[in-house]
């Protein structure tokens, strides 16, 4: 395995093994895993842990991977808002591993890994487009799914679902507007 | 110019002829966007033949077509493209909005889709369904043909 | 000039190899190729492609955001619509993910019905690919033949679920409804006639000199490139690597079926065509085995917290009424956690990454789309080909734009 100093947390969720690494050392961790045989990146995405009006509760309270498994309580990195998830696969041994890194900030930044894993090129652009995560070192970090002049990052939790108001749908109206504590 | 001629027997017969001609050879500009496009292609195939209605020539170029069948969801990025294609079509032109997404936004009531293509182009016939059956598209085409024939040579408002 | 992954993209105005200039042409989102709204910015040097840049996003539907606003059981309807050529397979990825998080296992009859629907969908998806590819390369009659078979499959879909295309048939907890006797009859008949039809297509195309000259040597993707770029499905199997999720990481009982993985060492469009033909035959084999072994039993997991009770029970049992009420107002809650499940669709690895925070709606649903990743290989495959071959190459990538843009 990669150096244990890099792993902050690890666990198994519904049969999938995962590890948490600090966001500064994501490149080291992934290149270490790559040399071990995890040469395919299946996908790269982001999860926004902001609490919002439809769920209530403090940020980070919803998902607590380690505590849910009965493991040690989450460490300092966890209350950060954005969780970048990388899914790696070893084609020979057919094992999969999920790597997480938590980042916060405005705009949230993390290193790009598209030179190590080419499929990450468009995945990072999509994550930038929909969440606003800036990937340092990406050659062409532009919007890929939304129009180029779109303002805002749609998949963030404080961005309303949008669309038209429909009758008899109170929940939909709650989602239409950004929550107060966004 | 046509108004004083409106009551003339000759022009009503001419109008009927023109309407018959236009209605029976409506050439769609294929604007297949998403799932409804597959059903539109299925309408053109042998089982449910749209060629019987004169619409076999699904033109790729909007300049050579009269009907735009918007089949599929129209996203924010695609909306200006759709309007450009519509503008390129010569008069007289018609629009069929095929499917729930094109008519009203469908299943997706969110930021990314235009909630109905009638926000940017005038629509003549709406077809509900997700996706509508090929026979539904034929039905809509027939409704449109009735309208075209009734219109005759009067220019559209 | 910019270097991306070994692809050199030159700009208009630079001198081309034949003494002219590089011309940047826009193959706009509205074009007659029926693969949807894909925009390509192509740098041409005479007729040769010097650089190709896909621009996507013209069909972005916000599916992932929409699913966060819908309950778990409502989300199934939306999963149908991203890869719109294989809706039950998308349903399957989502259903497996939710079931893994809930920790339930569907009954055997449901497993077999799921396999039947997946294979029917794979056939239908390959038929659309064949029909449209044939149409684009000039074999127009392929469209008619393939859609005729596809109509039979859609009739079966309609028989079992009421919908022709977006069936929403495979749901977390089982399937929508049991197979009717008429469905099983239709399936039996279909299995008998389909191999003959595949023979028909092969007779038309496989040894056809026009088809061969338009696809052999076009769109080369070496095995190393395919692995590095993350290609999956016929893109990687057409380069000789036998990676099929149904065999290598099986799900839903696929390990118990006897079928071969179709590969081809040709690494070009023709190889991928052969792979898809073989896959169609193997699908029919799997359907035969599935139909033969269809066990009796329930088709849904017997968990009242997940699926509503039958209507008769509502008259007698208060508990059933409470379950019914809870399920149709708030919906069930899935325990917190996250899971990734990948299934093999006609295009490759279609996966569903679900993050749950323990409530009645998902936190995040991400679809790993095979077409999104396969399309990134387009640059590598299309370089230095003629512009007319570009259509063949886009066809062979078999990208469904709904899947790419979600």
Image (tube, coloured by chain):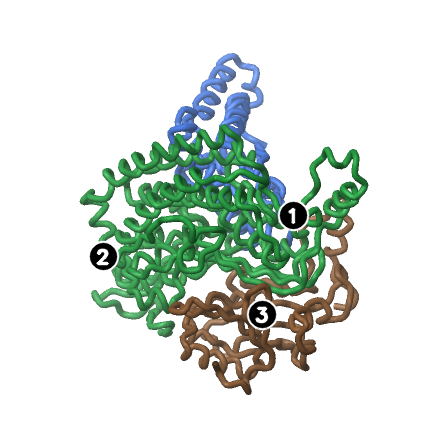
Quarter that holds the C terminus of chain B: top right
Discs 3, 2: same chain:
no
* Up/down of A128 relative to B49, above or below: below
Among the 4 quarters of the image, the one containing residue B65: top left
Q: Is residue C93 visible?
A: yes
* In the foreground, B131 or B147: B131
Discs 1, 3: same chain:
no
Q: Which residue is drawn at 62% across and 67% down?
A: A47
* In the foreground, B91 or C371: C371
For disc 3, the marked residue is A12
From the viewer's perspective, is B9 left or right of C140?
Answer: right
Discs 1, 2: same chain:
yes
The chain painted green is C
| Chain B drawn colour | blue
Report helix, strand or loop for mark 2: loop
Q: Where is residue C112 in the image (x, y as percent from the top left)?
A: 49, 44
Crowding at mark 3 (Cα within 10 Å: few <14, some 14-19, many 20+): some
Among the 4 quarters of the image, the one containing residue C44: bottom left
For disc 2, the marked residue is C217
Quarter that holds the N terminus of chain B: top right
For disc 1, the marked residue is C74
């Amino acid at each position: 395995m990669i150096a244990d100093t890099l792993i902050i947390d690890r666990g198994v969720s519904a049969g999938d093994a995962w590890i948490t690494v600090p966001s500064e050392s994501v490149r080291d961790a992934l290149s270490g895993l790559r040399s071990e045989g995890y040469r395919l990146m299946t996908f790269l995405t982001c999860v926004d842990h902001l609490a919002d009006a439809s769920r209530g509760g403090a940020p980070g309270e919803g998902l607590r991977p380690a505590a849910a498994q009965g493991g040690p309580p989450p460490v300092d990195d966890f209350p950060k808002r954005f969780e970048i998830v990388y899914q790696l696969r070893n084609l020979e041994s057919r094992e999969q591993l999920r790597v997480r890194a938590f980042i916060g900030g405005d705009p949230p930044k993390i290193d790009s890994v598209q030179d190590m894993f080419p499929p990450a090129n468009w995945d990072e652009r999509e994550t930038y487009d929909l969440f606003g995560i800036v990937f340092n070192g990406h050659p062409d970090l532009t919007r890929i799914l939304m129009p180029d002049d779109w303002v805002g990052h749609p998949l963030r939790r404080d961005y309303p679902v949008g669309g038209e108001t429909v009758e008899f749908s109170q929940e939909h109206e709650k989602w239409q507007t950004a929550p107060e504590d966004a | 110019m046509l108004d004083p001629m409106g009551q003339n027997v000759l022009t009503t017969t001419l109008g009927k002829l023109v309407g018959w001609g236009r209605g029976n050879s409506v050439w769609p500009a294929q604007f297949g966007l998403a799932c409804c496009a597959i059903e539109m292609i299925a309408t053109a195939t042998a089982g449910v033949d749209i060629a019987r209605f004169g619409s076999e020539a699904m033109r790729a170029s909007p300049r050579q077509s009269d009907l735009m069948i918007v089949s599929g969801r129209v996203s924010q990025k695609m909306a200006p493209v759709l309007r450009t294609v519509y503008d390129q079509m010569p008069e007289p032109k018609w629009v069929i909005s095929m499917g729930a997404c094109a008519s009203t936004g469908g299943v997706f009531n969110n930021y990314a889709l235009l909630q109905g293509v009638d926000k940017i182009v005038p629509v003549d016939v709406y077809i509900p369904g997700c996706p509508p059956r090929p026979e539904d598209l034929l039905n809509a085409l027939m409704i449109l043909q009735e309208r075209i024939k009734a219109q005759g040579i009067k220019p559209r408002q | 000039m910019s270097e991306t992954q070994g692809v050199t993209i030159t700009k208009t105005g630079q001198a081309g190899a034949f003494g002219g200039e590089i011309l940047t042409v826009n193959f706009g989102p509205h074009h007659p190729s029926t693969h949807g709204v894909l925009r390509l910015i192509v740098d041409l040097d005479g007729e040769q492609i010097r650089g190709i840049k896909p621009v996507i996003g013209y069909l972005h539907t916000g599916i992932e955001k929409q699913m966060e606003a819908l309950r778990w059981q409502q989300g199934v309807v939306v999963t149908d619509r991203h890869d719109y050529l294989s809706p039950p397979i998308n349903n399957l990825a989502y259903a497996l993910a939710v079931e893994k998080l809930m920790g339930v296992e569907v009954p055997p009859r449901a497993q077999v019905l799921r396999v039947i629907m997946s294979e029917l969908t794979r056939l239908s998806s390959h038929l659309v690919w064949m029909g449209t590819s044939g149409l684009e390369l000039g074999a127009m009659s392929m469209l008619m033949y393939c859609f005729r078979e596809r109509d039979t499959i859609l009739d079966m879909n309609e028989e079992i679920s009421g919908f022709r295309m977006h069936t929403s048939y495979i749901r977390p907890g089982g399937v929508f409804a049991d197979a009717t006797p008429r469905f099983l009859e239709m399936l039996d008949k279909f299995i008998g006639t389909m191999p003959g039809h595949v023979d028909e297509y092969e007779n038309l195309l496989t040894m056809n000199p026009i088809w061969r000259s338009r696809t052999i040597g076009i769109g080369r993707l070496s095995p190393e490139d395919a692995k590095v770029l993350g290609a999956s499905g016929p893109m990687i199997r057409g380069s000789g690597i036998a990676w099929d999720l149904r065999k290598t990481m099986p799900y839903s009982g696929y390990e118990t079926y006897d079928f071969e993985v179709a590969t081809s060492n040709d690494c070009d469009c023709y190889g991928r065509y052969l792979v898809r033909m073989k896959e169609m035959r193997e699908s029919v084999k799997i359907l035969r085995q599935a139909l033969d072994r269809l066990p009796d039993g329930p088709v849904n997991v017997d968990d009242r917290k997940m699926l509503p009770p039958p209507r008769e029970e509502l008259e007698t049992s208060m508990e059933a009424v409470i379950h019914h009420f809870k399920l149709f107002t708030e919906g069930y809650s899935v325990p917190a956690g996250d899971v990734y499940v990948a299934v093999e669709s006609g295009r490759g690895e279609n996966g569903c990454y679900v993050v749950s925070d323990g409530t009645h709606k998902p936190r995040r649903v991400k679809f790993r789309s095979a077409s999104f990743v396969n399309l990134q290989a387009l640059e590598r495959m299309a370089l230095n080909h003629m512009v007319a071959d570009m259509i063949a190459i886009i066809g062979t990538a078999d990208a469904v734009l709904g899947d790419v843009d979600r």
